[in-house]
Image (tube, coloured by chain):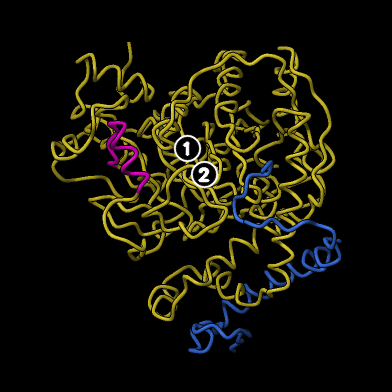
């Protein structure tokens, strides 16, 4: 017996609605109440739909997720919401109408009723800088939720909604998923249409699902990608570990949890070997150069004069320093990306997935967003980008799966990377891992209990 | 104190990309962090790397 409809997962909520045991109105009312409670403590919610729900239901097809409310990162145009990109002002999405990802949700029957907050302009992995205040981690409110899709991660972990849409140009789905103990999939570049997404210009940015477990993540991925992602049993899995570049300078507690996850796969007959990533020391820089320079053509004088001055000083400074980056540097990054793509194409002839910690350290403190690593203290952003950006620079899919808690009781995620177009494999392995561990590493229901709902009169 | 940046972009030409004092301080820290990374990257040999015809999102096995 469940105490709240939010304790049901995405698929089970849809099943309850289909069976008549729950109505979309009841479910959305419960989500709205919890959104208010969670937002008060975490700043995770940019807006909740306040209009006529019957019109939203009419716009939704009788698909597999009919009637289920979902979160949407505030970088997408919705019929009731102009996205604000984590800033104090409406963003320009380059078109009118709804974003393609929102349309995809409606096709599956889901209701885009919650706009989730994000790191300002999506240019950070912490979400401690937003127009609404820092997005706090529901596991520990002194810690960052991760970013940039921090609001989506919190909304799912704290059971406001059972599924949410995020975006990932340098780890922005996987890092908050890891920090908040949920599953986040970065699909292959180009597989989800990007119309109406404020980062649609990016050669690294993709739209993807965030959910409480792999089964729900698969359902949301199928809706966004518009494909059937059937479950397959995977035998003789081959896992490659880039030990030299991505398993050494890692917090010992995080590394222990991720090594245990690999051991669990190995005990289930996976073959583990070493993989090398050429030039791995340049991944973070290459990601920063790419995301930075690709944004520059978007920055017209009007934006620079009207929007930029209202942003956080560090965001303003980062934007302006990007004008320093040279054409030589950008061209070298393009060559580097080519090198990586060819190297990975070779690696995936010998392994099925490449595994590494999603982030090298626990969720950073809101007041001091640093990563404490064996090599010393580092910017949480730069440290995380070293791990997350491989998938973005090459376009391949990657998934972050909860794999335990560190010594402080904070979630740890392991990332699996697969060859181009192999989201199906990643989702199968995530489900397999949850079966092997009885789902014991997923965000627990009692996270939501930390946010008491106020009774209304 | 103001610092300007050297590109021909309209935003720069208009002065909108000039740093105020707080931004300049943050930018100095960011540049100090990036400088050694850029130096190492510029020394990384990429001369033999084949250039993809479609650099953005090309299938790695195409």
Using the image, determine if residue A226 lies above or below residue A370. above
What's the CA distance linking mark 1 and mark 2? 7 Å
Image-quadrant location for residue A52: top left
> With respect to residue B53, does A390 lie above or below?
above
Is the C-beta separation of discs 1 and 2 under 8 Å?
yes
Q: Is residue A168 left or right of residue A22?
A: right
Q: Nearer the viewer, residue A12 or A109?
A: A109
Q: Position of residue A171 (x, y in %)?
A: 59, 46
Chain B pictured colour: blue
Q: Chain drawn yellow, letter?
A: A
Tell me the quadrant of the picture where the N terminus of chain A can be found. Answer: top left
Q: Quadrant of the C terminus of chain A?
A: top left
Disc number for residue A138: 1
Q: Position of residue A6 (x, y in %)?
A: 33, 25
Residue identified by numbered label 2: A145
Closer to the eye: label 1 or 2 = 2
Name the residue located 48 percent from the left edge and 25 percent from the top edge: A229
């Amino acid at each position: 017996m469940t105490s709240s409809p939010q304790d049901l997962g995405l698929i089970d909520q849809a099943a309850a609605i289909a069976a008549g045991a729950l109505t979309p109105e009841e479910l959305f009312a419960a989500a709205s109440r919890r959104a208010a409670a969670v937002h008060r403590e975490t700043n995770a919610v940019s807006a909740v739909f306040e209009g006529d729900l019957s019109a939203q239901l009419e716009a939704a097809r009788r698909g597999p997720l009919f009637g289920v409310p979902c979160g949407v990162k505030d970088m997408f145009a919705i019929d009731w919401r102009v996205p604000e990109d984590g800033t104090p002002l409406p963003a320009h999405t380059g078109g009118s109408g709804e974003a393609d990802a929102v349309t995809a949700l409606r096709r599956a029957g889901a209701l885009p009723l919650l706009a989730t907050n994000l790191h300002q302009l999506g240019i950070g992995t912490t979400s401690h800088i937003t127009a609404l205040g820092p997005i706090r981690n529901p596991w520990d409110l002194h810690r960052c939720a991760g970013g940039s899709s921090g609001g989506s991660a919190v909304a799912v972990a704290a059971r406001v909604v059972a599924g949410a849409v995020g975006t990932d140009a340098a780890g922005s789905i996987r890092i908050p998923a890891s920090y908040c103990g949920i599953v986040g999939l970065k699909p292959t570049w180009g597989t989800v249409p990007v119309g109406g997404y404020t980062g649609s210009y990016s050669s690294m940015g993709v739209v993807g699902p965030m959910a409480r477990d792999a089964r729900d993540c698969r359902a949301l991925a199928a809706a966004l990608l518009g494909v059937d992602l059937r479950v397959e049993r995977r035998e003789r899995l081959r896992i490659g570990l880039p030990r030299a570049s991505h398993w050494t300078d890692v917090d010992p507690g995080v590394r222990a949890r991720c090594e245990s996850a690999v051991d669990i796969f190995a005990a289930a007959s996976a073959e583990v070997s070493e993989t090398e990533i050429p030039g791995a020391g340049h991944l973070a820089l290459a990601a920063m150069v790419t995301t930075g320079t690709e944004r520059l053509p978007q920055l017209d004088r009007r934006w620079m004069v009207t929007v930029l001055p209202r942003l956080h000083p560090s965001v303003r400074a980062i934007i302006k320093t990007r004008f320093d980056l040279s054409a030589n540097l950008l061209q070298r990054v393009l060559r580097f990306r080519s090198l990586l793509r060819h190297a990975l194409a070779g690696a995936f002839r010998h392994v099925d997935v490449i595994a590494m910690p999603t982030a090298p350290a626990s969720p950073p403190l809101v007041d001091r967003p640093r990563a404490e690593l064996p090599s010393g203290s580092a910017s949480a952003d730069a440290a995380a980008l070293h791990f997350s950006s491989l998938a973005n620079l090459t376009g391949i899919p990657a998934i972050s799966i909860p794999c335990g808690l560190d010594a402080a009781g904070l979630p740890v995620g392991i990332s699996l990377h697969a060859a181009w177009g192999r989201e199906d494999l990643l989702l199968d392995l995530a489900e397999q891992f949850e079966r092997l561990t009885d789902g014991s590493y997923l965000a627990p229901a009692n996270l939501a209990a930390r946010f008491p709902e106020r009774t209304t009169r | 104190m103001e610092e300007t940046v050297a590109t021909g972009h309209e935003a720069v030409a208009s002065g909108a990309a000039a740093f105020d004092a707080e931004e300049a301080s943050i930018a100095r820290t960011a540049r100090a962090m990036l400088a050694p990374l850029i130096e190492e990257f510029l020394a990384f040999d990429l001369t033999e790397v084949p250039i993809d015809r479609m650099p953005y999102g090309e299938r790695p096995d195409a």
